[in-house]
Image (cartoon, grey):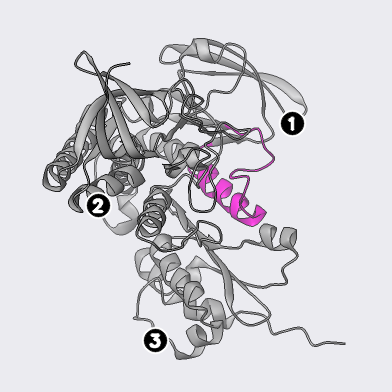
Amino acid sequence: MAQPERYDILILGSGGGGKLLAWHMASSGRKTAVVERRWIGGSCPNVACLPSKNEIWSAKAAHLARHGAALGLTTGPVTVDMGVVRQRKRAMVDELVAIHLRKYQESGAELIMGSGRFVAPKTIEVALNDGGTRLLAGDKVFLNLGSRAAIPPVPGLEAARPLTHIEALELDRLPAHLIVLGGGYVGLELSQVYRRFGSRVTILEPGPQLMGKEDPDVSAEMAHLLGGEGIEILLAAELLQVRGKSGEQVAIAVRAGGRERVIDGSDVLVAAGRVANTADIGLDVAAVELDARGYVRVNDRLETSAPDVWALGDCAGSPHFTHVSEDDFRIVRDNLAGASRGKEGRLVPYCMFTDPPLAHVGLNETEARRQGVSVRVARMPTAAVLRTQATGETKGFLKALVGEDDRILGFTMIGAEAGEVMAAAQMAILAGIPYPRLRDAAIFAHPTMAEGLGSLFAAVPAKAVPP
């Protein structure tokens, strides 16, 4: 083996945690290199978080234009130019990539475009995208490999060349009938997007409810909202076979509701979970162990089984959110500086950017029951927040879980600006503020959506009186 080029810090993958670590270490004077196969900055700015929200906004504009009469606006027929939608998204991505490249240049971190594979412990051979190879070794190595859409083993599905979120966000045409496999966050966001653009949409969810980890009332409310926009939803749908090719004509045989039927469509989108990008990159040579699901096995400090090798983000089994990958970076950064931080017990918020959006942080009722945690539940319709009377965005509800010591344990909202309201509840949970402080002492600006927190916590049931 030829002598490798040596670096203090070697990072495989340039996603949320990896790029922040690279810029930090390089700015601190460490010789740092990042190997990235394709997406500069990872999936988030290129093919996931931000591009999907870009098209969600275009779809919302189309929806508002079609329903402008209710707001006193007179419009003619509304059509969607998917080529313009795609170009708007691409322009945003190009600017984000340019920002990333500037940060690499300013920090001094070297970005190497190519596919990396371990050929020895802490040593990576890179097949460069523009030809040739490089052999790199790092004193410390970090895996930020990401994940990709899983393709369920349904007969005929892979041959049908289904869309994933990547291809769905690159369409310059409108599917006549989009069949979405999976009722999770990605599937629901894109289902609503294409319905609002003008496609017929059918969701096939193998589980008994949409968003299987959410409380049943949250799932039911979202099903009601999406169904109200004309999206067909089949629950407990067992996929039997797929025929045809996505983009031309597809026929999906499915068993649901005790009977078999065939659903004909023009396109099929797979949104049925994720798998880690850990296969075929020589992790065994690097002595990096995987768990039973194919994710990198890490301890609380995100250290792998190999000395001086860490993993961050999706591939480490962390919740699949950019903000969690960025927190993984903070854990690794601080521990390298002598601190003692771990990933267990983190309070992880998340949002699904349907319209209205879903936001959640902390425990939900299902988790509380499973853990045997006694909670009191307050619930109120979003329509009770006075701001919605002005905007007309009345759909959804707010829900909070409160413990026996009056601390807030969880918060969920379906409604306009849910993510921003959730952030206020998240701060209260982190601070350990008892809910009466929000109910009686907090002054919320009027009329804001966060003002609803005061009314919500006023609805917390009294403590049960001991017998």
Q: Which residue is mark 2?
A: 24
Please, is residue 406 above or below residue 346 in the view?
below
> Which x, y percent locates residue 80?
27, 33
Q: CA distance from mark 1 to mark 2?
A: 54 Å
| N-terminal label among 3 and 2 | 2
> Can you tell which of label 3 and label 2 is closer to the viewer?
2
The amino acid type found where label 1 is placed reads Gly
Where residue 105 sits, quadrant-wise, is top left
Q: Is residue 83 left or right of residue 299?
A: left
Q: Is residue 445 left or right of residue 438?
A: left
- Residue 423 is marked as none
Determine the residue located farthest toward the right in the rendered image: 467
The amino acid type found where label 3 is placed reads Ile
Circles 3 and 2: CB atoms closer than 8 Å: no
Q: Could you tell me which secondary element the residue under label 3 belongs to?
A: loop
Q: Which residue is mark 1?
A: 257
Magenta residues span: 204-231
Q: Quadrant of the C terminus?
A: bottom right
